[in-house]
Image (tube, rainbow, N blue to C red):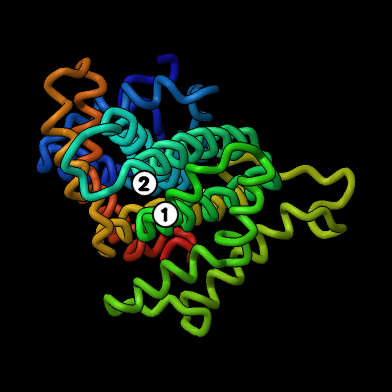
Amino acid sequence: MRSGTSPDTHYRALSPRLAAKLRLVWSARGHDLDRIWGDCMATVPGITPLPDPRPAERTASPGTPSPDTAAHDQLCLFDQTLIWAMALRTAARVGAGLDGLALIPAQVAALEALTSRLVDTLSGLRMLVLAGLPIPALQLARSVSEDVDMVLALLLRRKLAQQFIACTCAEEANSFWRRHIAGGRAFRLVAEKLYEVGLDHSDQSDYGRWRRGVLTLLGSAVHSSALGLRAGDAAAPWPQNAALRDCLAFVTHRMQEFCAWSHVLDTGLQGDLARIRLARAAGMPPREARLLGFADGGAEILLDQMRWMLAEPDLPEDARR
């Protein structure tokens, strides 16, 4: 691929700390970072070399942090969630029809459909961020957030997944959305389950207030208004654009929540991913076998990165909520 065959060559301002941490965590869990990263990122539409670090960085004294390092670190962590979504999509596709799963067939089918959509949306959002287009990027960020809520709800409720899969036309799909997903319905279902395991993400919690604020901002990007850039103003390009950085941080965090909550809530997904790998990996091409392995064991990597983001003072505040 033109943009490099490993994270080290693609994210040219990646911090040594994150680069070392990535390799350590991936290796400790038996996954080949370069191979899986190359397998997945080669399929991302519009993948191109990232901009060179700013001239000030090239003349900076040794040991001086790059002004672009935080942005490259952030994009790298975003791409890790994209890779996980690709792995999950592969597992759902090859796991269809496998006996002995905790998830029913409708849930597996819903997982494949929604992870396919997430992969496409995340890939499109990545292109928009790197192109310096904050408004459409924020619009896709809202879509990602809604799909994360939706897939978690379908993993929790079998009948809901059956109704989702039973939709045969756009009218039925829109009706399903209005009745079960829109207006925060899916998230409230998830929040109720989180409360049962000791996590208060209700509307009255700090998390709930933060979430409302972010979704209000994302909604303002979806619905046209006079807010935003004045006519003739030019948005700053990535990585200098704060809106683009915050957009990536929010989406990365939501995908990490998808990973964390799907395991914390005992949806059955974790065990099923192991069953799918054991049953299918031996007969798959090497690339898909690696993705099945990452779908099964990659959650710990994303959770480690989530903890790192929450503790990292240099990342945007939204990512540390």
Which of 277/95 is in front? 95
Res 14 seen here: no
Residue 180: give x, y in percent of width and height. 55, 61
**Residue that badge 1 annotates:** 154
Quadrant (top left, top right, bottom left, bottom right) of the C terminus? bottom left
Badge 2 or badge 1: first in the primary sequence: 2
**Residue that badge 2 annotates:** 107
Quadrant (top left, top right, bottom left, bottom right) of the N terminus? top left
Residue 203: give x, y in percent of width and height. 52, 79
Q: Is residue 169 left or right of residue 276?
A: right
Q: Amino acid at mark 1?
A: Leu
How far is mark 2 from mark 1, CA to CA? 7 Å
Quarter where residue 281 is shown: top left
Q: Is residue 247 left or right of residue 200?
A: right
Answer yes or no: do the residues labelled 2 and 1 have beta carbons within 8 Å? yes
Near mark 2 (Cα within 10 A), the count class, few <14, some 14-19 or many ≥20, is many
Q: Residue at x 73, y 52 (%)?
A: 222
Q: Amino acid at mark 2?
A: Gln
